[in-house]
Amino acid sequence: MDEQEKKEELETELEQETVETEPAPAEIEEETQATAEQPTEEEEAPAAAEETAESVSEKKKKAEKEGSNIVGIIVGLAVFIGLLAYCWMLPGGSSVQDTGVLYAKDNDLYFYDLKNDPYLLQEGISEGGSYHYFYTAWGASCTEEGHWAYYADNIDETGAFDLYRKDTKNPSAEAEQIDSNVYDYMTSKNGEVVAYLKGKDEAMELCTFDGTEARAIADGIHLENEVYALSGDGKYLAFIDAYNMLNATVVKEGNALPLTDTAETYAMAEKSGILYFVAKAAEGYNLYSYAFDGTEPALVAENIYTMEMMPNGKDVLYCKTPDEIVLYSDIIVDDMAESDAALTEADGEAYEKKLQRDAIREAAANGEGFAPLLQECYVLTGGKSVLVADNVISAIGVEHDRPYVIGYKAKEFTPLRLSVLDGGLDMVEYIYYMSLSYGGVETFLTDIAGNLEALEGYKVQPDTMKISADGKKAAYLTSDPNTEGNILMEMEMGKAAEAQAVATNVENFAFVGSDLFYYYDYADGEGTLAMAGSETTIPGACGVQYADDAVYYIANADSTTGNGQLRDWDGKEETVIDENAFAFQYKGNGKLTYISGYDVNEGLGDLCYFDGKNARVLDTDVTALFIY
């Protein structure tokens, strides 16, 4: 059995073992869009990185999914609010910015700046094309910083549209038409720059607009979610061209610098604008960084297995094959030295086996070994790579401002005794690989200081890990070994062995400040809301959204209309915001926009706004609310 066959067999064994003890690593990576590609020959293709910004096509797909799910439930209104809850639930807390509200009415687009009265932004936004799915809509957004609203106008039946932008701080100012025949766009955070794809064919033209002029950057681009990325400040653009070449562009200059045609994945740091990519090398794959300064990309690390931009938008997580080989001297215990010394050729078969062991001893003494299978996990932070875990099978970043990593690793290997081996060096390698499999897998959590700990529980679900903003508490889901239902675990950081089960059958959860809120026993569109350490429970809740200050939800929704009480709960007091709300969106700082008195047959409702103290109607007979 050669080395590659051993690796493939071990990977199979690890997957089978993981199914019995933990969720399969491949499943976790798939859910977080970091799934490693299948090995080709003797190489391992690195996993895909996450996109740095959400383009309009991604928002459209999200709204389309949300809307189509809800439309499907109208057939049976008895479980209507089940999909309502599904679509408006934010299982990981809210990162929505305190920006304006965009909504549609009578095929027209309106804007509300959270202070003054709403006003008409654009008439006739659709010409036979769909911009909304039930009460959600796509194609318009307010930038996270600054004062720009971008929107699609004259959407046709193919999905193409005219792209406009409007200075929302100046209602009397004319809207700017940026371009036509646009299918997708992505803006900088301040809204000063936009990158977009235009054209009528599958192969489109990639363009930029920097506030003064539109530039064509490249043509032959395919409409895909990860084909281009714009830095948060709008200065830099990266994209994959028609020849599979990764290019880097300084937006103000408009030039495209080709970097490599073997890039397996790339990601742009949101804050620094540095481009990170993994490309094929002479052997395996290497990780590079590029600072858009015209110099050659810098080598960060070699023999890369996976790479992703961490959720904080600045640090990079990667796993690589260790530079050092697995030494025979580290995995073998010679417990037969004395007995073997007494053997002679006259001892026949026993002597032959002794010669095999002598070969192993010699290889160990000479510092020989073989290629490792498990990975080393690093975080690139502040320009330095920090080793955070070894013997890793897979790892992902945790949603937090600080760099935390969670994943699977093989449990500590127990050295092999020569007395149990029946073969030479090949058998040593084979048994080593098999021992990793049967030795079991554990789920680990670590920070960049190396505070690594094993998480308690059956089938820990790494992608559910949440850490409080102050970094003092953590919570995650495991599985009930009898029912396979979710069990919520809570722990103090640094005390994983003391993790406590909080509740069973948990649907989602989040930290609100330092308090852990959770939603459980979800069925037929409703569930129960609770807080760890509190005896208060709130049944009949749906559409739960967690924010920094409280939990927002709809309670006691009517099974015929879907409308119910819009409330907030901070763990102490419960406040009713509206008696007849259908759906809502958190806008930050305790503010909400919501649809009240929605008629599912007419597809119309009243658009309301809650400023943290008082609620008021912004407009009536509203068609849809834009999601961004």
Image (cartoon, helix red, strand yellow):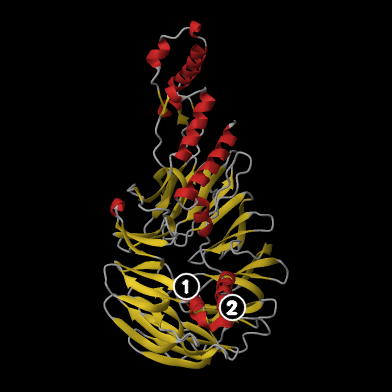
Tag of residue 208: none
Across and down, in percent, residue 69 comes to 56, 75
Query: Going by the image, does 210 lie left or right of 447?
Result: right
Mark nearer the viewer, 2 or 1: 2
Residue 289 percent coordinates (x, y): 51, 51
Amino acid tagged 1? Asn
Q: Quote the CA–CA distance across marks 2 and 1.
A: 37 Å
Q: Residues within 10 Å of mark 2 (few under 14, many from 20)?
A: few
Farthest front residue? 482
Q: Which mark is residue 190?
A: 1
Secondary structure category for the residue under label 2: helix
Q: In which quarter of the image is residue 548?
A: bottom left
Which of the 4 quarters of the picture holds residue 506? Answer: bottom left
In the rendered view, tell whether residue 12 sits above or below residue 605: above
Amino acid bearing label 2: Gly
Q: Where is residue 413 in the image (x, y as percent from the top left)?
A: 41, 36
Number of numbered discs overlaid on the protein picture: 2
Mark 2, residue position: 72
Q: Which residue is drawn at 36% across and 86% down?
A: 577
Q: In which quarter of the image is the N terminus?
A: top right
Residue 567 image position (x, y, % from top left): 36, 82
Residue 275 in view of the camera: no
Residue 363 in view (yes/no): yes
Tell which residue pokes out farthest to the top in this image: 346
